Image (cartoon, rainbow, N blue to C red):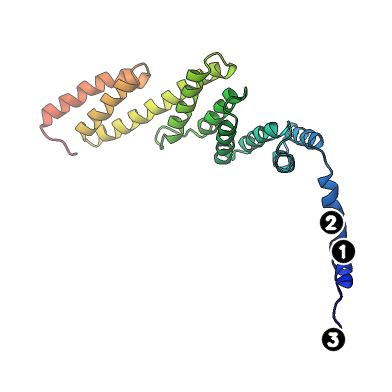
């Protein structure tokens, strides 16, 4: 059996992958400016996956380019648009960690909040997203009260509070209907103490009195 010489092996490899090899090198010749233009165009056209690819390539090839910071931010934005919220949160938080004094930080915190806000579920479900969104929007208002995003955050906080109050009312009602009046009483008291200005908070006062009345009347509680 004849041995394959290095030259023959090189020819064989080139015949299989020669075109791809040239294609990769052509890709490598793209400048940072070209990549940012491509990524921005893809983002505008809502080709978010392609935009992520372009911006990731830019960031990897030209980490010290003036466009690298923009690429980091647009990757997070594209992931948000794709509803890849966990990935977007990670990207936004990484951006804030790496560039804490960047002028885009108010925007970054706001978008992080939106990643949680957009996943708020009905009041009968877990309210983790409501709490996380409220925390991010509150942090934004406290740090950057004069930012354009702060005004939007105020309205979103109202929605978060409404959802949280609704959840507490839902749970309290569940306990009350199950005749677990002490558990219901605790929930109504918490509701009134934390969300007094909501519709549910105002109703809680009457329900607190009703729970106390039922506990006094029955003398026992199924809890």
The mark nearer the N terminus, 2 or 1, is 1
Tell me: residue 218, above or below residue 144: below
Tell me: residue 168, above or below residue 63: above
- Dividing the picture into quarters, in which one does residue 127 lie? top left
Number of other residues with Cα within 10 Å of mark 2, as a class: few under 14, some 14 to 19, many 20 or more: few
Q: Secondary structure at mark 3?
A: loop
Q: Are marks 1 and 3 in contact (CB under 8 Å)?
A: no
In space, the residues marked 1 and 3 are separated at their CA atoms by 23 Å
Q: Nearer the viewer, residue 139 or 95?
A: 95
Q: Nearer the viewer, residue 180 or 45?
A: 45
Q: Position of residue 101 (x, y in %)?
A: 59, 24
Q: Position of residue 60 (x, y in %)?
A: 71, 43
- Dividing the picture into quarters, in which one does residue 57 lie? top right
- Where does the N terminus fall, quadrant-wise? bottom right
Q: Which residue is mark 3?
A: 1
The mark nearer the N terminus, 3 or 2, is 3
In space, the residues marked 3 and 2 are separated at their CA atoms by 30 Å
Q: Which residue is mark 1?
A: 14
- Where does the C terminus fall, quadrant-wise? top left
Q: Which residue is mark 2?
A: 21
Number of other residues with Cα within 10 Å of mark 3, as a class: few under 14, some 14 to 19, many 20 or more: few
Q: How many marks?
A: 3
Residue 143 appears left or right of 207: right
In space, the residues marked 2 and 1 are separated at their CA atoms by 8 Å
């Amino acid at each position: 059996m004849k041995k394959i010489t290095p030259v023959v092996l090189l020819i064989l490899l080139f015949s299989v992958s020669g075109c791809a090899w040239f294609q990769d090198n052509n890709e490598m010749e793209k400048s940072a400016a070209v990549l940012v233009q491509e990524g921005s165009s893809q983002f505008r056209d809502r080709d978010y996956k392609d935009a992520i690819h372009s911006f990731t390539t830019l960031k990897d090839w030209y980490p010290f380019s003036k466009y690298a910071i923009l690429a980091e931010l647009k990757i997070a934005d594209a992931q948000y648009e794709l509803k890849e919220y966990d990935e977007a949160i990670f990207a936004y938080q990484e951006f804030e960690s790496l560039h804490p004094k960047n002028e885009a930080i108010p925007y970054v915190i706001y978008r992080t909040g939106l990643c949680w806000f957009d996943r708020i579920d009905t009041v009968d479900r877990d309210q983790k997203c409501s709490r996380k969104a409220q925390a991010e929007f509150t942090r934004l208002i406290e740090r950057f009260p004069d930012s354009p995003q702060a005004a939007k955050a105020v309205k979103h906080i109202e929605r978060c509070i409404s959802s949280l109050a609704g959840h507490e009312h839902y749970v309290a009602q569940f306990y009350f209907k199950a005749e677990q009046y002490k558990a219901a009483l605790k929930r109504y008291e918490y509701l009134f103490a934390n969300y007094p200005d909501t519709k549910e908070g105002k109703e809680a006062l009457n329900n607190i009195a009703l729970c106390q009345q039922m506990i006094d009347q029955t003398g026992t509680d199924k809890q």
